Amino acid sequence: MRNDGTSPALGVRPANLTDEELLRELASLHGTRHETFRHGADDALTNHSRRTDELEREYLRRFPAREINPDRLR
């Protein structure tokens, strides 16, 4: 871990991201999920899953009352 809260392998701690950065990171991960799942090495998939989980948990922590689309209930 560096003094600025980053790690070369793990990225910036989710709590240190601005709301805008968090949303951008989530969009990027969601956009690359299928490709990583289908073609990534085991380590890549593990890291992708871990990072997605970290960022999604942070999003839910910040926005517990997020807007829910009633058409998306399953």
Image (spheres, rainbow, N blue to C red):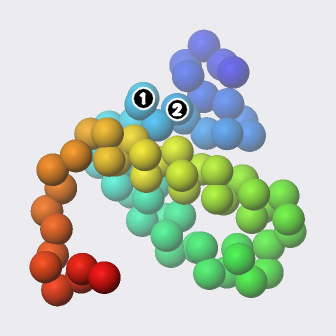
Q: Is residue 12 left or right of residue 43?
A: left
User: The N terminus lies in which quarter of the figure?
Assistant: top right
Q: Position of residue 39 (x, y in %)?
A: 79, 81
Q: Are marks 1 and 2 in contact (CB under 8 Å)?
A: yes
User: Quick one: 57 or 8, which is closer to the camera?
Assistant: 57
Which residue is denoted by mark 2 in the rendering?
Answer: 13
* Identity of the residue drawn at 72% across and 36% down: 8
User: Quick one: 5 or 50, which is closer to the camera?
Assistant: 50
Count how many numbered circles sit on residues in the image.
2
Tell me the amino acid under the disc marked 2: Arg
Q: Position of residue 61 (x, y in %)?
A: 32, 39
- How crowded pointer 2 is (Cα within 10 Å; few <14, some 14-19, many 20+) is rated as some
- How crowded pointer 1 is (Cα within 10 Å; few <14, some 14-19, many 20+) is rated as few
Tell me the amino acid under the disc marked 1: Asn
Compute the Cα span from label 1 to label 2: 5 Å
Q: Is residue 26 left or right of residue 71?
A: right
Q: Residue 21, can we see it? A: no
Using the image, determine if residue 2 lies above or below residue 22: above
Local SS, label 2: loop
Q: Position of residue 6 (x, y in %)?
A: 60, 28
Report the residue that reaches farthest toward the front.
74
* Identity of the residue drawn at 31% across and 82% down: 74
Which residue is denoted by mark 1 in the rendering?
Answer: 16
